[in-house]
Every structure is written in C-alpha cells, then in structure tokens.
Image (tube, helix red, strand yellow):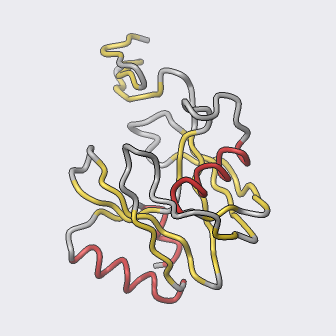
C-alpha cells in the first residue's frame, strides 16, 4: 500500500492498482433519521467538493475535535442538536454502511432518533451555515424535485423516501 498524498484528515492511497481515499484517523460518521411531529428533519448546507448547497440527513463525524471518545449514540445526539437544534430522547442504531466503497474507505452508522425536543436554533458550528427543513415523509419526493430544480445536490440517503 502506498500513500500518494496525505493531508490532515484524508489521504489518497494506492493498493493493488486501486486508488481510493480514506480518513487518516480511521474516524467514521453518523447519519441521523429524525422525525418531529410527523416531519423528517433535513439539513441544507454548502458542500465544497460539489460546489453547491446539498439536501441531506443530519450527520457528522464520530470522534472529531468536539468529541474524541464519542460513542455512536453520543455523536448522533451531539450532531443532531448542533445541526438542527433538536435533542433526541433515544437513539437506535440501524447499522453500519458505506456510501461510496469504490472511492472512499469511510463508513457511516445510520441511526434513528426518537422523542426529539427543540432545545436551540441549530444551524451548525461557526464554520457552517445549516438551514433546517421539516418535511412530511409523503412530501419529500416533491421537496427533493424542487430543490434539484433549484440546482441543489441531493444526498443518496434520501432515496429511501423517493
């Protein structure tokens, strides 16, 4: 295995002729499905790699600078509150997944948040400008189509509601 390039968080690796990216720290991520009053919480934020705002489920890294020893559940609760302003009463793990296993070695843990209570404004950290959307599940397909027409990127995990 040869590291072709290494930054603070990511490295480009070649192994057996296959080039891919992985996190230097081995961190994984958490993605949160949360409903409040029958509406799914979605977030919109600018994503530098695609050069535009994207519609996504709330998500974040496990064990990043804010929580070096976070469990999946602790990271999910922290990220949900940070991004949306909602604190979950309970977190259920749904499994570990890979979103682009041909290019990226990172996994994510999908969780469902229950009994969410509004405790703040959300919007992310100082370096983020997150817009929170509450969308009824039966309207997500129309919401996604509208946002796509507006030129936004759509995270693949929303396919569950399409």
Q: For the point 70% across and 69% down, which residue is it?
A: 116
Q: Is residue 24 left or right of residue 40?
A: left
**Front in this rendered view, residue 162 or 41:** 41
Q: Is residue 91 left or right of residue 26?
A: right
Counting from the top left corner in percent of width and height, residue 98 is at 53, 45
Decide: is 119 above or below 102. below
Q: For the point 44% across and 64% down, which residue is it?
A: 43
Counting from the top left corner in percent of width and height, residue 41 is at 54, 71
Q: For the point 77% across and 59% down, which residue is it?
A: 92
Determine the image quadrant of residue 61: top right
Decide: is 47 above or below 134. above
**Front in this rendered view, residue 18 or 29:** 29
Counting from the top left corner in percent of width and height, residue 90 is at 79, 61
Determine the image quadrant of residue 130: bottom left
Outermost residue, bottom direction? 138
Determine the image quadrant of residue 114: bottom right
Q: Is residue 70 left or right of residue 82?
A: right
Counting from the top left corner in percent of width and height, residue 31 is at 57, 54
Work out which quarter of the rendered image holds the N terminus and state it.
top left
Decide: is 73 above or below 23. below
């Amino acid at each position: 295995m040869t590291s072709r390039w290494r930054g603070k968080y990511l490295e480009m690796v070649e192994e057996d002729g296959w080039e891919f990216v992985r996190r230097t720290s081995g961190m994984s991520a958490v993605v949160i499905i949360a409903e409040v009053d029958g509406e799914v919480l979605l977030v919109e934020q600018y994503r530098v790699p695609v050069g535009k705002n994207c519609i996504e489920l709330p998500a974040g890294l496990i064990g990043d600078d804010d929580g070096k020893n976070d469990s999946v559940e602790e990271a999910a609760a922290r990220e949900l509150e940070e991004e949306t302003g909602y604190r979950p009463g309970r977190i259920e793990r749904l499994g570990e997944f890979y979103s682009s296993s041909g290019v990226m070695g990172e996994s994510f843990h999908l969780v469902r948040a229950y009994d969410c209570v509004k405790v703040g404004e959300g919007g992310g950290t100082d370096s983020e400008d997150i817009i929170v959307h509450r969308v009824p599940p039966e309207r997500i397909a129309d919401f996604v189509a509208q946002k796509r027409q507006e030129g936004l990127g759509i995270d693949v995990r929303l396919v569950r509601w399409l």
